[in-house]
């Protein structure tokens, strides 16, 4: 059976050229933390996640520092119960990257994201954005749902793929649970 272009691109990413990737990461570290790019680096992954090469789709590269998920001790006055020094941040790096990019591009909506590399200090992600106001997006049946008002600011409400994974909504135990709960739906189960 013959394989297509995206299959071969995906296979190439399983064992990337170390020298090329290292040179790229040197450039990425020197650039800003959130940078708009012309086209996705991993075209196969971007296409899987909904990217199309048309107006209204924007790809952004985000750099996130590794480590530091433990909360720092507050220096202002609090009672001991509210110090929260032993609690860790529950968000994964990908969700953090999506939120940081969304704060920079406020008129766009996050569609999805994927990892493009990591080194000893940073993770690098590409975040796919959609401009919900563009007519090309509103007329596209496969993506025009993102222009509806219930889908505004979905990255900050935990509705992206990375956020749902971080919230534990993909585990088997969660799939057996009735969501939303009976109390949330009302006693009659509307």
Image: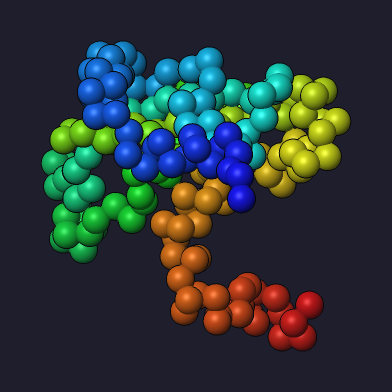
Q: Position of residue 22 (x, y in %)?
A: 23, 24
Q: Is residue 111 above or below residue 89?
A: above
* Figure quadrant of residue 44: top right
Quadrant of residue 183 in the image? bottom right
Q: Position of residue 105 (x, y in %)?
A: 54, 23
Left/right of residue 116 with respect to residue 112 in the rendered view: left
Q: Observer-nearest residue: 134 or 154?
A: 134
Percent position of residue 64, x then y: 30, 33
Q: Seen in the image, is 46 located left or right of residue 80?
A: right
In this orientation, which residue lies closer to the viewer: 130 or 81?
A: 130
Position of 178 with respect to 93 (left or right) is right
Q: Quick one: 7 or 138, which is closer to the camera?
A: 7
User: Could you say where residue 153 lies in the image, as x and y percent from the top left?
Assistant: 60, 39
Residue occupying the point 41% across, 57% down:
166
Task: Look at the image and name its color scheme.
Answer: rainbow
State whether residue 65 appears in this view.
no
- Tell me: residue 175, above or below residue 85: below
Q: Residue drawn 17% across and 59% down?
A: 86
Instruction: Identify the residue shown where x is 21% and y is 33%.
Output: 119
């Amino acid at each position: 059976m013959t394989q297509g272009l995206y299959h071969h691109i995906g296979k190439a990413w399983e064992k990337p050229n170390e020298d090329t990737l290292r040179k790229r990461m040197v450039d990425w570290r020197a650039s800003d933390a959130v940078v708009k790019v012309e086209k996705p680096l991993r075209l196969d992954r971007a296409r899987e996640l909904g990217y199309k090469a048309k107006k209204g789709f924007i790809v952004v590269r985000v750099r996130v520092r590794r480590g530091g998920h433990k909360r720092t001790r507050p220096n202002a006055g609090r009672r001991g119960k509210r110090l929260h020094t032993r609690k860790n941040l529950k968000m994964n790096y990908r969700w953090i990257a999506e939120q940081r990019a969304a704060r920079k591009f406020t008129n766009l909506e996050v569609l999805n994201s994927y990892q493009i590399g990591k080194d000893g200090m940073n993770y690098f992600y590409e975040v796919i954005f959609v401009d919900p106001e563009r007519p090309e997006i509103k007329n596209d049946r496969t993506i025009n749902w993102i222009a509806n008002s219930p889908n505004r600011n979905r990255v900050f409400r935990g509705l992206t793929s990375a956020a749902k994974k971080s919230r534990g909504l993909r585990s088997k135990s969660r799939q057996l649970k009735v969501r939303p709960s009976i109390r949330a739906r009302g006693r009659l189960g509307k």
